[in-house]
Amino acid sequence: EIGKETLDSFSRIAMDLGSVKNIAEVIINGKNAGVLWKAPFTTEDIKPLLHPGTNSLEIKVTNLWRNRMIGDVQPGETHPVTAIRRFYKAGDPLLPSGLLGPVSLVGRTSAP
């Protein structure tokens, strides 16, 4: 939840996702706020997408293909996604993937 006073006190507001492995799409109140694919994982100004009160936030993170292929060879997997030659075994380690954070809003009182 964000207050009207907070929105009024900043000329710009960005969202910093912290650490992401590897791609994130940010959607605020049903509107796309950008696709972030390299550090720093920070959106442009999202203030126009925000309103006082409760806002909706959705962050779609793309998993690593390696992790998907390891998942497809797990015991009991009956619906594999990948249909290519298997390079990995079920016991291979997964690589860090996902929204690792921390996520924060960054307010600015003047243009960058």
Image: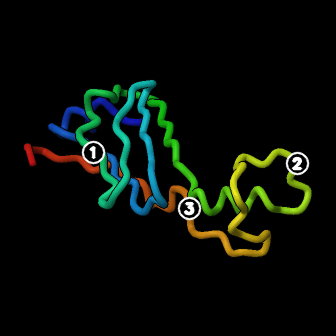
User: In the rendered image, which residue does mark 1 sit on?
Assistant: 14
> Is residue 36 shown left or right of residue 95?
left
Q: How is the image coloured?
A: rainbow
Sequence-earlier tag: 3 or 1: 1
- The crowd level at tag 1 (other Cα within 10 Å; few <14, some 14-19, many 20+) is some
Quadrant placement of the N terminus = top left
Secondary structure, mark 1, is: strand
* Mark 3 to mark 2 CA distance (whole Å): 23 Å
Query: In percent of the image, x 24 and y 42: which residue is there?
Result: 44
Query: In percent of the image, x 78 and y 48: which residue is there?
Result: 80
User: In the rendered image, which residue does mark 3 sit on?
Assistant: 97
Residue 21 percent across, percent down from the top left: 48, 60
Residue type pointed to by label 1 = Ala
Residue 73 percent across, percent down from the top left: 80, 61
Residue type pointed to by label 3 = Ser
Task: Kindly indicate the quadrant of the structure image that contains residue 92.
Answer: bottom right
> Is residue 40 shown left or right of residue 112?
right
Sequence-earlier tag: 3 or 2: 2
Q: Please, which residue is most extreme toward the right here?
A: 76
